[in-house]
């Protein structure tokens, strides 16, 4: 056993990059996207090839294994290890050069695929392979796994695109593998010359044969390509430091033919027949993976067949030819690029959505990507379905039908001994079934620990022994990624679920989608890492803190990993008191973006609130939790004492403002928002009511509208009444109040009831003060009894408050049925007009819009009613995605200003700066308006304000 202190000291002395043996770094790399977990000793982020060689030398001296790691999206366990993990995403992540004429690029292993695609696109080029994780997988990981993607029927696997590699061997030799035996280690050519017959006959001829080592690439008739033979070796032979890759000419135009079949077998049997038409993709998926909201041709399964051409007409003509030749139930040809992207997102998200059965049951990888000859795919799928049924298992196959490669996640029970035993037995039988159909155990993601143990069933013992001899030539000390491919660990060892508590954890939220089990909620994160994308595409929000910092611990996946390790108690040992988890969650904006953008709907905002609740239980909290968590109380006092002018005056005095911010844990860069001189409800009591004859709607006076921006409430009343609706406010007396009793002055009521205000509890939830949040929400439910007794909806103007009432309230008060009834009544401003005044025509504004969709609106409430209302008012254009960065209390808290500003600079502020001067700046959230004001000097307005102004005009 090595002395880890000596190892750490040796690495720090030899390596210029970061060396981290802390609990956080180790916890973040215990898992990839597989079922497996290994705890490393530490993580090294090398700066260059010299660092790699130095790290290998130190680890070899101490007998410690090394695991190269890219984006950590491998699903067979090969990106995990018990020694030192080399993280190439930190520094060795550059595109070194791109030669458009030669159609080549020189890349470092940590370069994310999308960055290469972006650089190649202006030249009409692209890298051919494109896994669904293209926004976060790295070129080094793709080479290590020989990744493929949806376009492999046209452009092959990663091995088909690799020209030359730069590799450091475990003993420090630097080689440049290529064709003609270039870069071969000593003895490799002699070994191959003695096994030519086996190499010519022992490897299935499949487009998607990824399993084992690609030793047949070393045959003389195949050019003795050492670089190609390393593709798919899963970091077990050498450490990649650089690669020369080939690019392909991207078609100028594309069309997407969506072919509908009665079932997946029909789609699978049809796929091979489409290959002679030269499609770019032939992807298949069935109805159980397609959201009901997606508009597809009628059928039970679909093929996504993409065609290309120099013109739109040429691409469309090729798609039409395929439709005519295909025997389909129905079909659709899509030429609009935006709609094509939307459909491809459905396919790409399947790796996450497949982790849940329709009834919510968990499903896992393990047989994610075996492949058979395309012509046998239909027969194989029928046998596969039969085997599933025999074991009482379920799965939803999808994937690369044109290459005979199937992805599937299966509802294995990996939490109990009998369930794990069934997993092993099923795996062994399925391996035999794949081989019987002439297939490969892995058709894309590699063998790792999931399938390497079964390779003798595919190749036979002698070929597997040959793999071991090759490993010994490259890595005689068995330093690199031991337990993978050769001498593998058992497929049912090191399962990541084994360390989690068997009894439910005592928690505050109900976690209804996970049967109240916090461990199951944390298990939702399967590691596909959609949260690690470096830019938010379209309306997406997740994960703004990762995009601002680039650090894994500030991604949704990173935080989920730390929570997993907190529950396991091996690496993170302090449970709910963990500083590692606290610090990682500190930069979570609680934007809820992951609740919608994560394919498995990880809800890190809720997990953060849960953690903070336990972490600070019985202890003093940060000052900001009292200053901003109790904001409704402080503002209520100001309103009752009518001291808004005094508060604003004091906040305008520099010395006093600085002292107040220091005392309240508020960032010194922030201005303190002004309190309104007249609250919304005070204005309401003094106004002349408009009787109206339409439906009754109850307008929610949230804290922000009530005290900080009552103009929004006044505008909403103006518009709702103009639409013919009768507006009331919630009761303010309990018990016995009535709807709209903001004016109630009954002597009997005052004698028998207490005055109070409704509150969604958002500020308490976001700071983890869940006991207080429950108290506030229970009081709110008491006040709302008269409202809940009617059919009136609750109109909530502040998106974050509406989201809290829709999700946080019923999940926190899961034992109070009134909370679910309340959540069902909550409507946004646009939803209210659409449902209760469908014939009303808004006043014409006829101006372009800019701004940003509120992150909670995007994640929880939905945007379509707002889009339709804006369109009806002549407000043209789309709002930006992402998060404004203020996010309630987050951007005000000390230490968060830089990240908050960086989030705003990602989409919101550039969109506002680049908009025409005539644009209306829309920002329905108070946080968004405040951020615009403080960072850009721009006044954002709620949609209600814009419409009310148009009514006046």
Image (cartoon, rainbow, N blue to C red):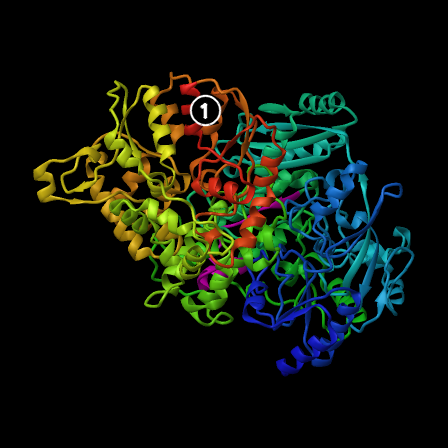
In the image, 741 versus 196, the foreground residue is 741
**Is 272 on the left-hand or right-hand side of 357?**
right
SS label for mark 1: helix
Membership of 412 in magenta stretch? yes
- Give the answer, above or below, for where 243 lies relative to 489: above
- Give the answer, above or below, for where 748 lies relative to 871: below
| Location of residue 47 (image quadrant) | bottom right
Q: Could you say where residue 804 lies in the image, as x and y percent from the top left? A: 37, 44
- Tell me the residue at 80%/58% (across/down): 242
In the image, 478 versus 19, the foreground residue is 19
Quadrant placement of the C terminus: top left
Residue picked out by circle 1: 869
Quadrant placement of the N terminus: bottom right
- State which region is magenta: 405-425
- Tell me the residue at 35%/49% (across/down): 647
Membership of 157 in magenta stretch? no
**Is 390 on the left-hand or right-hand side of 730?**
right
Q: Could you say where residue 603 lies in the image, as x and y percent from the top left? A: 45, 50
């Amino acid at each position: 056993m090595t002395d880890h202190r000596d190892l750490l000291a040796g690495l720090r002395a030899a390596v210029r990059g970061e060396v981290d043996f802390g609990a956080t770094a180790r916890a973040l790399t215990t898992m990839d996207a597989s079922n497996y977990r290994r705890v490393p000793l530490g993580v090294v982020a090398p700066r260059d090839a010299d660092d790699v060689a130095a790290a290998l030398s130190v680890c070899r001296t101490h007998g410690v294994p090394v695991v190269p790691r890219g984006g950590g999206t491998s699903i067979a366990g090969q990106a995990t290890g018990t020694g030192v993990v080399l993280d190439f995403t930190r520094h060795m992540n550059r595109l070194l050069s791109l030669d458009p004429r030669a159609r080549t690029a020189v890349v470092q292993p940590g370069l994310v695929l999308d960055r290469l695609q972006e650089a190649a696109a202006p030249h009409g080029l692209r890298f051919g392979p494109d896994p669904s994780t293209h926004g976060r997988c790295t070129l080094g990981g793709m080479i290590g796994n020989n990744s493929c993607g949806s376009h492999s029927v046209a452009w092959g696997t990663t091995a088909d695109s690799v020209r030359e590699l730069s590799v450091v061997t475990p003993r420090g030799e630097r080689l440049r593998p290529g064709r003609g035996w270039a870069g071969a280690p000593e003895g490799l050519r002699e070994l191959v010359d003695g096994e030519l017959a086996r190499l010519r006959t022992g490897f299935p001829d499949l487009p998607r044969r990824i399993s084992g080592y690609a030793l047949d690439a070393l045959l003389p008739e195949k050019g003795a390509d050492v670089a190609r033979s390393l593709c798919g070796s899963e970091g077990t032979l050498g450490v990649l430091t650089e690669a020369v890759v080939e690019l392909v000419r991207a078609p100028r135009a594309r069309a997407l033919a969506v072919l509908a079949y009665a079932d997946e077998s029909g789609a699978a049997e049809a796929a091979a027949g489409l290959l002679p038409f030269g499609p770019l993709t032939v992807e298949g998926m069935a109805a159980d993976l397609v959201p009901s909201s997606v508009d597809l041709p009628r059928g039970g399964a679909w093929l996504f067949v993409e065609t290309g051409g120099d013109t739109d007409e040429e691409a469309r003509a090729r798609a039409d030819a395929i439709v005519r030749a295909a025997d389909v139930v129905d079909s659709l040809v899509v030429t609009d690029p935006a709609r094509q992207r939307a459909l491809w997102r459905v396919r790409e998200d399947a790796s996450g959505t497949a982790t849940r059965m329709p009834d919510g049951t968990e499903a896992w990888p393990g047989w994610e990507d075996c492949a058979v000859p395309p012509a046998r795919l239909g027969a194989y799928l029928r046998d596969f379905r039969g085997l599933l049924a025999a074991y009482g298992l379920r799965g939803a196959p999808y994937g690369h039908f044109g290459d005979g490669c199937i992805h599937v996640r299966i509802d294995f029970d990996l939490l109990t001994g009998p369930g794990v035993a069934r997993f092993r037995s099923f795996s062994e039988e399925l391996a035999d079934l794949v081989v019987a159909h002439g297939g490969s155990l892995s058709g894309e993601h590699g063998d790792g620990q999931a399938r390497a143990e079964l390779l003798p069933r595919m190749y036979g013992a002698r070929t597997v022994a040959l793999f071991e001899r090759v490993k010994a030539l490259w890595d005689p000390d068995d330093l690199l990624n031991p337990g993978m491919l050769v001498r593998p660990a058992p497929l049912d060892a090191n399962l990541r679920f084994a360390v989690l508590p068997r009894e439910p954890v005592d928690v505050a939220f109900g976690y209804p989608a996970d049967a109240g089990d916090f461990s199951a909620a944390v298990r939702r994160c399967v590691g596909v890492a959609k949260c690690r994308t470096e830019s938010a595409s379209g309306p997406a929000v997740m994960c703004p803190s990762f995009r601002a910092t680039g650090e894994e611990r500030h991604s949704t996946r990173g935080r989920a990993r730390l929570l997993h390790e907190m529950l396991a108690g091996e690496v993170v040992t302090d449970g709910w008191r963990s500083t590692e988890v606290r610090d990682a969650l500190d930069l979570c904006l609680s934007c809820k973006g992951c609740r919608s953008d994560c394919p498995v709907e990880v809800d890190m905002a809720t997990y953060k609130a849960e953690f903070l609740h336990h972490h600070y239980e019985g202890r003093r909290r940060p000052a900001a939790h009292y200053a901003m968590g109790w904001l409704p109380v402080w503002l209520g006092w100001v309103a009752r004492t009518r001291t808004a002018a005094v508060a604003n005056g004091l906040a305008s005095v520099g010395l006093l403002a600085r002292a107040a911010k220091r005392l309240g844990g508020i960032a010194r860069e922030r201005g303190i928002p002004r309190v309104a001189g007249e609250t919304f409800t005070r204005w309401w009591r003094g106004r002349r009511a408009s009787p109206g004859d339409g439906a009754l709607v109850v307008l929610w006076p949230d804290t922000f509208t009530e005290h900080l921006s009552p103009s929004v409430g006044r505008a909403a009343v103006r518009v709702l009444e103009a639409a013919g609706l009768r507006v009331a406010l919630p009761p303010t007396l309990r018990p016995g109040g009535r709807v709209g009793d903001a004016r109630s002055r009954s002597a009997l009521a005052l004698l028998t009831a207490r005055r109070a205000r409704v509150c969604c509890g958002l500020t308490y939830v976001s700071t983890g003060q869940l006991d207080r949040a429950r108290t506030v929400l229970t009081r709110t439910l008491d006040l709302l009894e008269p409202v809940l007794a009617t059919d009136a909806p609750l109109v909530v103007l502040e998106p974050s408050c509406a989201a809290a009432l829709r999700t946080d309230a019923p999940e926190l008060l899961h034992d109070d049925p009134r909370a679910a009834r309340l959540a069902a009544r909550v409507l946004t401003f646009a939803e209210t007009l659409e449902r209760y005044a469908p014939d009303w025509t808004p006043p014409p504004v006829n101006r372009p819009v800019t701004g940003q969709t509120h992150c909670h609106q995007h994640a929880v409430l939905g945007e379509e009613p707002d889009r339709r209302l804006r369109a009806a008012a002549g407000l043209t254009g789309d709002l930006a995605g992402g998060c404004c960065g203020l996010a309630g209390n987050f951007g005000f808290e000390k230490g968060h200003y830089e990240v908050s500003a960086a989030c705003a600079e990602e989409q919101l502020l550039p969109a506002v700066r680049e908009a025409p001067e005539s644009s209306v700046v829309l920002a329905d959230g108070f946080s968004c308006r405040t951020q615009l004001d403080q960072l850009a000097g721009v006044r954002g307005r709620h949609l209600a304000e814009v419409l009310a102004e148009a009514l006046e005009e």
